[in-house]
Image (cartoon, rainbow, N blue to C red):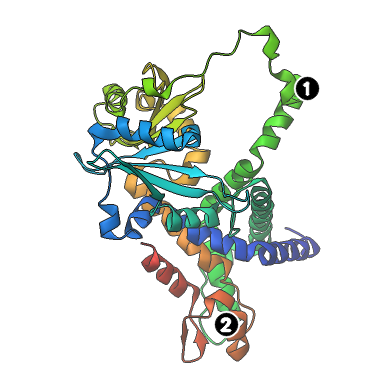
Amino acid sequence: MIRTDIIRLYKSVHTWTGIVAGMALFIAFYAGALTLFKDQIGQWAVPPATAAGGTVPDRLPGLIQGVLRERPQAGESFEIALASTGGGMARMRWNEPAPDGQGPPRSFAATLGVDGIVRIAPDPEGGLAQLIYTLHAVVGLPVVNGFTLSVMGVVAVLYTLALVSGVIVLLPTLTRDFFALRLGGNLKRMWLDAHNVTGIVSLPFHLVMALTSVAFAFHDRIYDAQDWLIHGTPAAAVAPEPASGPAPAAARDPAALQPPQELLALAQALSATFVPQALDYHDVAGADASVTVYGTDPAALARQMAVTLDPYSGRVVQDDLTVPRRPWWTVFLHCTWAALAACWCGGCTLCWRWRAPGCFTAATCCGWKPAAGASARAANGPCSAGTRSGWPQPPWAYAWAAWRGCP
């Protein structure tokens, strides 16, 4: 039996961690549920006349060369987004830093017209979808950088403390109160019951989200600590000295890039069921140039598959398309932490199941309302929109509204 003073201590920890991190988590959960449909939201936000523009796949080599001549900085990283149906139009996209060095990067898209002229304009699909992703990735902050990722990591640590302390507080009465949902005049009791039920039922989801968020925020520091503990030296000291290796390779000429159609054929040769969706180029003028072909494979466990190639020789650098043919335990590891956090595995069914706890979490975060009557309406914050005859709606009403509101 847990002592009363310990329960009281953990109840204070649970309350204050929830107060400090609650609003950030509220934003992150709703934005995360929407982020699962980032591509669809981007397409929905574009007017039909704008979305119809693009480049015929056979003309993509000319588009790439034309953009790299006008915007050489695009060669550091750009994407060729393919149409969802065969024979459709493709678009080239990339990001550039803000002119003043402050604020989020600007997204551009380019197409090659029938007249052979490259047309560059702000990417119409990048705005809304990227904003939703940013709000999810850094818990409501406007940009993704080292500082905001650290803030997200602190929120994730508080999130973990809230989960652990909440379970400890509930343990003494878990068997008695788990399925209890006492409706009536005591609103505080009703909100607390609903909060406890949704929190315990979705606890595995919460633990995965909390732990993977900490890993995403502090992975560089974790790697540095690992190098220090294992090798006894910082990561920079472990790297080999440049002088002892061969001379760096000369820069490559982007004019010698293989056509995207040939790269797509090489990727599809690895899996007959692979459906490519995009080509992601990196450092095309450097010695380490690479192109990653992203897509889906109905025969694979993961929702998103990829193969990385050398864009000049077509050599396979990294192959994820053969994951289903690896031993089962490597597939399991591939689809655990990061894959679960991003809902990359299990196809549409698991994606929708993963979305449900994210929507229900909004009810969990705002489900314990200590006030009643008129004061409850003032204390409900973002949950005060739904009222009926002056009474706050129960938490499952907000969860249902969240479920219906997800696109």
**Vertical placement of residue 372 versus 251, above or below:** below
Figure quadrant of residue 243? top right
Q: Which mark is residue 187?
A: 2
Expressed as whole percent of the image width and height from the top left, the position of residue 83 reads 27, 43
Asked if residue 49 lies left or right of residue 198, the reply is left
Residue at which label 1 appears: 233
Q: What residue type is labelled 2?
A: Leu
Of residues 11 and 309, which is closer to you in this image? 309
**Quadrant location of the C terminus in the rendered image:** bottom left
Position of residue 359 measured from the top left corner of the image (x, y, whole percent): 46, 62
Q: For the N terminus, which image quadrant?
A: bottom right
Image coords of residue 100 (percent x, y): 62, 51
Task: Classify residue 51 as left or right of residue 334.
Answer: left
Q: Earlier in the sequence, mark 1 or mark 2?
A: 2
Query: As shown in the figure, which amino acid type bears the numbered disc 1?
Result: Thr
Q: Position of residue 383 (x, y in %)?
A: 53, 76
Q: How far apart are marks 1 and 2 (CA)?
A: 57 Å
Above-or-below relation of 264 to 19: above
Number of other residues with Cα within 10 Å of mark 2, as a class: few under 14, some 14 to 19, many 20 or more: many
Q: Which residue is drawn at 47% across and 81% down?
A: 386
| Local SS, label 1 | loop
SS class of the residue under badge 2? helix
Most foreground residue, 352 or 70: 70
Count of marks, rendered view: 2
